[in-house]
Amino acid sequence: MEEPAVRQPFFSRVLAELGRVVWPSRQQLFSESVSVILMVAMSAAVVAASNRLFSWIANRVFLG
């Protein structure tokens, strides 16, 4: 295994990478957070509705 030509400490490399990150604006962060929360809520509602529907069907079929 070859040794790297220049050894930099781990944290200095991490800070260098963080300097290259394009950070979102406050508005963009807020709007994307809201959209993620809404999608999760809608997905949960679909799963809950499907569960109730299939429970109702199973009760009708197996319990009469």
Image: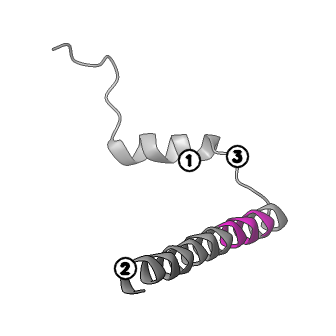
Q: Which residues are magenta?
A: 31-39
Amino acid under disc 1: Leu
Which residue corresponds to the image point at 43% horizontal and 76% vertical from the top-left? 61
Q: Compare residues 37 and 47 and report the one nearer the observer.
A: 47
**Mark 1 / mark 2, whichever is N-terminal:** 1
Amino acid under disc 2: Phe
Q: Few, some or many C-alpha atoms within 10 Å of disc 2 (few <14, some 14-19, many ≥20)?
A: few
**Helix, strand, or loop for circle 1?**
helix
Looking at the rendering, which quadrant does residue 59 occupy?
bottom left
Q: Few, some or many C-alpha atoms within 10 Å of disc 3 (few <14, some 14-19, many ≥20)?
A: few
Q: Few, some or many C-alpha atoms within 10 Å of disc 1 (few <14, some 14-19, many ≥20)?
A: few
Q: Residue furthest right?
A: 27
Which residue corresponds to the image point at 74% horizontal and 56% vertical from the top-left? 24
Q: Compare residues 50 and 6 and report the one nearer the observer.
A: 50
Task: Look at mark 3 in the image and give the residue it sits on.
Answer: 22
Task: Look at mark 2 in the image and give the residue it sits on.
Answer: 62
Give the label on residue 18, or none. Answer: 1
